[in-house]
Each structure stands twice: as C-alpha cells, then as structure tokens.
Image (spheres, rainbow, N blue to C red):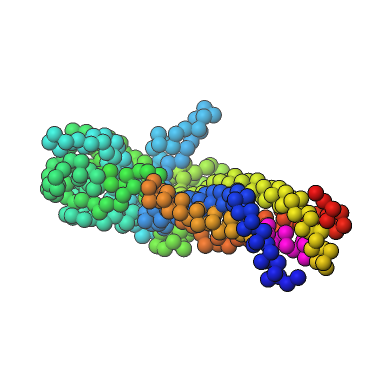
Amino acid sequence: MSIINLFKVALRAIANNAFRSFLSMLGIIIGVAAVIVMMAIGQGSKESIRKNISQMGTNVIMVRPGADMMGGVRQDPSSMQTLKVSDYEAIINEKKYVTFVSPEVTSSGQAIYGANNTNATIYGESLDYLDIKQWDIEEGVPFTEEDVHKSAKVCLIGKTIADELFPNGADPIGKTIRFKSIPFRICGVLKSKGYNSWGMDQDNVIIAPYTTVMKRIAAQTYFSTINCSAITEEMTDQAIAELTEILRTSHKIKDESGDSDDFTIRSQQEMMETMSSTMDTVTIILVVAAAFSLLVAGIGIMNIMLVSVTERTKEIGLRMSVGARGIDISNQFLIESIIISLTGGLLGIILGESIAGLASLLFHLPTSVPGWSITVSFIVCTLIGVGFGYFPARKAARMDPIEAIRYE
C-alpha cells in the first residue's frame, strides 16, 4: 500500500474518533506549550539581563575592598577601609589599559525640597562616572573638576528624584535640595534609564562630587568602590591585571610574602557570564520539569493507540486477508501516532507563543522564543509519535489474520 493511501486511511481513522484523538493531542499541546513558555521566559530574562548590563558598559571594572579575616571570622567587605585616595591617584597616574576612573562613596537618606521628600541614594563620584556608566544628561550641565576640588555642594539627579521633588513639570535646574541636612544645588537632570532586570529603579539617584560626599555626608577617608572602564571589552583582562599590579604595589603586598589581596576586582563581562550561566541553569531545570508532561502525553498516545488496535482488530484481519502486509499495518498505526503527535506539537507551539506574548504584554515579563526551540519541538514530537506508536503498531502487524477476523 502506498504512503499516500496510508495517510488517507490514518486521517480517516483519526477523523472517525475526533474527540478521542483531540484528548490524545491535549497532553502534547500542554507539554509543548509549557516547554515553549519556560524557554521563552528563560531566554527573555537572559537577554534582558545582558541588555541591562550592556547598558552599563561591558568593559566596566569594579574594584572593591576585600573581605579580611579577623579572629577566624571573615569580615564584611563594606566595613573595610582598604581603598584610599592614594589608590585612586596611583591608578590615574599609572593606567594604560584603563580609560575612565571614578572613586565611589555612597549614602542613603531622604532628599527634601520644600514640602516634598523621597528616599534616595547619593553617589559620590568623579566626572568620569558618567562615561563609565554611560549616563546622559537630559537637562542642565554636569558638575566640574573645580567642584570636585572644592567639595562643592552641587549634584545631578535622576528622573525619579526630579518627578518626586518637583511635580507638575517644575524645572529643577538651579534649585537647592537637602540631603541629610546638607544643601545641594541641582546642576543637571540625568536621562531616564528605567528599571533594571532586578526591579531596581536606576533613576532614583543623586550624583555629587566624591569629595563632597566623603567630607560633608559620609565623614570618611576611604572609598566603597573604585569604578573603572577598560579601553575596549577585549582588553578587560589586561586592565584587570594592570589594576591588580597597581593596587598590590600601592598596598605594599609582595608576591613572595604569600599575602592575599585586600581588594577584589570584578568586571561587568564576568558578571554577565555568571548571570547568563545562572539563567541557563534555571531555564534547563524549568524545561526539564515541563518536558515530563510530554512523557506523560506520549504514554497517553500509546494507550489510545493500543485501544484503537483492539477496537479495529477485525478491520486489521480483513486488510491482511486481502493482501495487506504486516509492514503496511504497522506503518498505518505509526502514521496515525505521528499525525496526532505532530498536530499536537503544532498547536502547542502556537499556544506557547501566545501565552509568552500575553505574559510579556500583561505582566511585562521579558520573553523571547528562540527559533531553534520550534525545530526541536517538531523533532521531539516526531520521536514521541514513533517511539510511543511503535509498540501498538508492532502489535497490530503481528496479528494472525484468521484470529483477527474471528475477534468479537
């Protein structure tokens, strides 16, 4: 019997039991849709994280105090005071693979203007910070080197701060706000960056000269971070090696002494790779969990096909008695199984993409359906159709024609 005739017979058999066939497909539909949705969310989250990190610059390098040991207990890095002004000056004077450098001091508190107030974080930075973090100024101008040298009480504010303290479209440029009772004159408003992948509002910031924050707010002589940027992303490793050498020399850490560094250096590129690896692991776990429903669906198809073989025993006997070979009978049931599986897979892909689109539209979840996932879904559905349809097809092919005709 030709393949075309086998397809016709298989389609007719499926149509005669349309509702039962649909129930068989339902498991495949749900399984494929679940896998597609999980992959879409995982891939979308990964791309969103990479995009947010890229917006901050993939060549960004962060130098932070290293956690030291005291009495056998590892100390909190934020409490250490190993990054000094001398380290910043050494990096500025000796850098070759680093372009921009900005020491950082932070403090959280309440920003006040008139009757309005909001909680915010103030960042003490140098002018290079805007280039390192790729900040653009929407209104006004940045503070100057002279402001840094004189510890001037000037600042740049994020869009959230501007909206909270100056509602109804009031112009904040030139106005004076107070942060921990210290007055700061606003010289510029930063262009909005929105929320990042971790749900943090990137516009809820105040940026002032690091000297001002160190002396007037934090009252400290050390930095919490030194932000740098490599000349290019490809030179990040050379820049990290260079910074390590400069700081080891500045801190008088000798290689032969075996002392560990009292600082840590991390790059955005390293962070991106770590986050991507984490998201890949999470996505795999979710997809494997969703894939179990495909296994259950395959078992359901095998069960339905076995029932179909039993119901059509006399038909099988008649076909064999008029010359149908065992391979023809086997192929007929295999084709039915594959049609059910592939049709369910196609409907599952459509449903999965629809759910992913709705999740993005209604819940603002980052989703992205990778093209290869559709191909993999079709391959998996074909394998399910063949794998779980083989046993019923083999059972049908091995029937004795005479016994099959006599079957009631």
Left or right of 124 on screen, residue 267: right
Seen at 82% across and 51% down, the residue is: 407
Residue 328 among those drawn in magenta: yes
Above or below — where is 177 with respect to 42? above
Above or below — where is 276 with respect to 71? below
Left or right of 9 on screen, residue 106: left
Across and down, in percent, residue 390 comes to: 75, 56
Above or below — where is 204 with respect to 28? above
Can the viewer see residue 143 in this picture? no
Left or right of 358 on screen, residue 279: right
Q: In the image shown, does 123 or 391 lie closer to the viewer? A: 391
Q: Tell me which corner region of the image, top left, top right, bottom left or bottom right, holds residue 233.
A: bottom left
Q: In the image shown, does 7 or 152 lie closer to the viewer? A: 7
Across and down, in percent, residue 387 comes to: 72, 55
Magenta span: 326-338
Across and down, in percent, residue 176 comes to: 13, 42
Q: How many marks?
A: 0
Across and down, in percent, residue 262 comes to: 47, 41
Seen at 72% across and 55% down, the residue is: 389
Residue 83 among those drawn in magenta: no
